[in-house]
Image (tube, coloured by chain):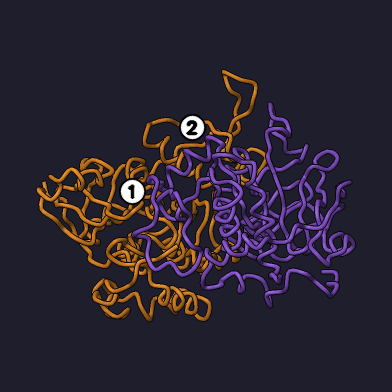
């Protein structure tokens, strides 16, 4: 059975929701949304998802080929102001793609380089990251594992709270911060190393630990149970194909690589 | 009392240095005809509060803005708003960057007459480091520290609704009214542009009355401007205009604000609409599917 790297990453990412129970799963971007939808249709049928607009759905919409929103399986109105009522209750798990992630699990989507008054590159702004990070679980999706993303120092603009002792607010412990997993094109990581150090949990088929370490700007712990990332099952691939009939997943990673890598990537 | 006014009449309350909140979200249901009328005016040094899209981008590019209070400025399908990006990278504007939810809390504090609302949002992040005017305070009830999100008191709110009557009863028929009710309640004075004007009895239907998110005494001016949200969407009447946004991004990139303004702004809204293909073509824009 052949599968693409995008499909492998989608299946790995879907697993972050397996034990969540009845929470709102929010995947920002096509593959993260596909991952959350896959989880809701397979491993965690209690998950809740929206139409990315203003309604909660009892069955997730396809991520491609949807002609209109009418006729979808609405569950309740869920406008943006109401999303915050959910966020602030903590019953949510977001899967997002930050531009930078540092060794503390802090992330950046706001701006890069220069000064804060005049950044070299203005990105989106902090959006909902500060609130998401203090209220509920977050996982990260990284299409290209590199030192540009996994930065050496702190993020240029710290948009989300992480396991940084210097920034821990008074009255808080690291138990109040819930960073789950990081799914990249090379591996799956978490922050369950010593003192919440980032830790490699599984390597994608054909990827070496050296590749991961060489493309990360900070030291990583390695799980004593380091394994190969589970490959997609036939059922998962069938559900993915149904959720993405236009095969938009093939356009999300450069050159749509196969799920089992043969060549070793250069340090970047 | 009729609150019907032209955009120019309605906007005459806006003075240099005022704080103006703009409703909508990114490329969705923005009061763009009102923004264009502001672009044609002499007003300057504004502080903008918005879930920003091309409204914020254009006003920044035109040099109307001193400060932006924002969580993002984005066109969604085009994640980075080109004119805002340029203004930021040139250091041309001051900013107060807050979380999306903090912005909502700031509007609610203003609406409720509170100086601030305590929240955990922003703790441990650069939001509180980069905005020293946002204080972290002790709680009288626990030993934690809290962010005191200050009230975002607006002098004027600009929002775009689907329909209104002349007394200021406004319907938002879109699937989401976003935070528009909070913008209106946070403001001393609210100006609402609408696609359609209706009679008072239109609201007698309970179903329609449920799509009215603030009372008429919160609305000071109603500006009738069919297609007035273009190039943003006014769901269910029309979608946003990706091709105009692309053209806008190109022109801003190549020739700055004047590149876009010379080609499109025009002397009034009728000229603008002609330059983008006319009202019929705006009404034909398909609704976005997410």
User: Which label sits on residue B117?
Assistant: 2
Q: In terms of sequence position, does the residue under pointer 2 or pointer 1 come before the other? A: 2
B85 sits to left or right of B290: right
Q: Quadrant of residue B59?
A: bottom left
Q: Quadrant of residue A121?
A: bottom right
Report if residue B59 is visible in the image.
no
Between residue A181 and residue A120, name the one nearer to us: A181
Image vertical order of residue B249 relative to residue B174, above or below: below
Give the percent coordinates (x, y) of residue B9.
21, 58
Between residue A85 and residue B96, name the one nearer to us: A85
Q: Residue furthest top?
A: B141
**Disc 1: which residue:** B156
Q: Which chain is orange?
A: B
Q: Work out which quarter of the rendered image holds the C terminus of chain B and state it.
A: bottom left
Which subunit holds the residue at mark 1? B
Residue at the image position 54 percent from the left and 39 percent from the top: A22
Q: Residues within 10 Å of mark 1 (few under 14, many from 20)?
A: many
A206 sits to left or right of B72: right
Give the percent coordinates (x, y) of residue B142.
61, 20
Badge 1 element: strand
Give the percent coordinates (x, y) of residue A107.
68, 51
- Discs 2 and 1 carry the same chain letter: yes
Image vertical order of residue B155 relative to residue A259, above or below: above
């Amino acid at each position: 059975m052949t599968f693409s790297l995008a499909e492998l990453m989608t299946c790995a990412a879907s697993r972050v929701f397996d034990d969540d129970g009845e929470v709102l799963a929010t995947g920002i971007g096509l593959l993260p949304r596909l991952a959350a939808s896959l989880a809701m249709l397979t491993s965690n049928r209690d998950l809740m998802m929206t139409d990315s607009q203003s309604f909660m759905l009892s069955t997730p919409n396809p991520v491609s080929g949807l002609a209109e929103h009418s006729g979808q399986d609405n569950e309740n109105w869920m406008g943006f102001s109401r999303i915050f009522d959910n966020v602030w209750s903590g019953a949510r798990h977001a899967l997002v793609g930050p531009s930078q992630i540092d060794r503390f699990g802090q992330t950046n989507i706001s701006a890069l380089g220069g000064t804060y008054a005049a950044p070299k590159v203005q990105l989106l702004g902090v959006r909902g990251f500060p609130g998401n990070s203090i209220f509920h679980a977050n996982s990260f999706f990284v299409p290209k594992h590199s030192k540009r993303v996994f930065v050496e120092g702190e993020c240029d603009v710290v948009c989300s709270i992480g396991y940084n002792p210097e920034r821990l607010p008074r009255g808080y412990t690291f138990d109040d911060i819930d960073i789950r997993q990081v799914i990249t094109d090379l591996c799956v990581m978490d922050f369950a190393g010593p003192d919440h150090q980032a830790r490699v949990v599984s390597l994608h088929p054909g990827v070496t630990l050296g590749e991961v370490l060489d493309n990360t700007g900070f030291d990583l712990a390695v799980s004593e149970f380091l394994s190969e990332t589970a490959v997609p099952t036939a059922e998962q691939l069938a559900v993915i194909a149904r959720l993405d009939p236009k095969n938009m997943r093939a356009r999300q990673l450069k050159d749509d690589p196969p799920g089992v890598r043969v060549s070793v990537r250069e340090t970047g | 009392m009729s609150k019907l006014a032209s955009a120019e009449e309605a906007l005459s309350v806006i003075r240099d240095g005022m704080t103006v909140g703009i409703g909508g979200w990114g490329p969705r249901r923005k009061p763009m005809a009102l923004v264009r009328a502001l672009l044609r005016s002499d007003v300057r040094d504004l502080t903008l509060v918005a879930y920003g899209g091309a409204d914020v981008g254009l006003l920044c590019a035109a040099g109307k803005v001193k400060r932006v209070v924002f969580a993002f400025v984005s066109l969604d399908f085009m994640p980075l708003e080109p004119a805002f990006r340029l203004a930021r990278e040139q250091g041309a504007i001051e900013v107060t960057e807050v979380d999306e939810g903090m912005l909502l809390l700031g509007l609610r504090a203003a609406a409720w007459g509170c100086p601030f609302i305590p929240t955990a949002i922003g703790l441990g992040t650069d939001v509180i480091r980069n905005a020293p005017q946002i204080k972290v305070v002790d709680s009288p009830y626990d030993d934690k520290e809290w962010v005191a999100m200050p009230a975002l008191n607006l002098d004027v709110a600009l929002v775009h609704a689907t329909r209104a009557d002349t007394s200021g009863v406004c319907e938002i028929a879109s699937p989401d009214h976003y935070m528009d009710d909070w913008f209106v309640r946070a403001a001393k004075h609210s100006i609402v542009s609408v696609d359609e004007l209706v009679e008072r009895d239109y609201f007698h239907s309970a179903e329609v009355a449920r799509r009215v998110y603030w009372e008429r005494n919160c609305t000071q001016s109603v500006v009738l401007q069919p297609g007035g949200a273009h190039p943003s969407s006014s769901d269910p009447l029309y979608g946003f205009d990706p091709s105009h946004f692309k053209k806008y991004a190109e022109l801003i990139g190549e020739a700055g604000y004047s590149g876009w303004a010379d080609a499109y702004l025009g002397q009034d809204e009728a000229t603008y609409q002609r330059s983008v293909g006319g009202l019929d073509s705006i009404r034909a824009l398909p609704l976005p599917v997410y």
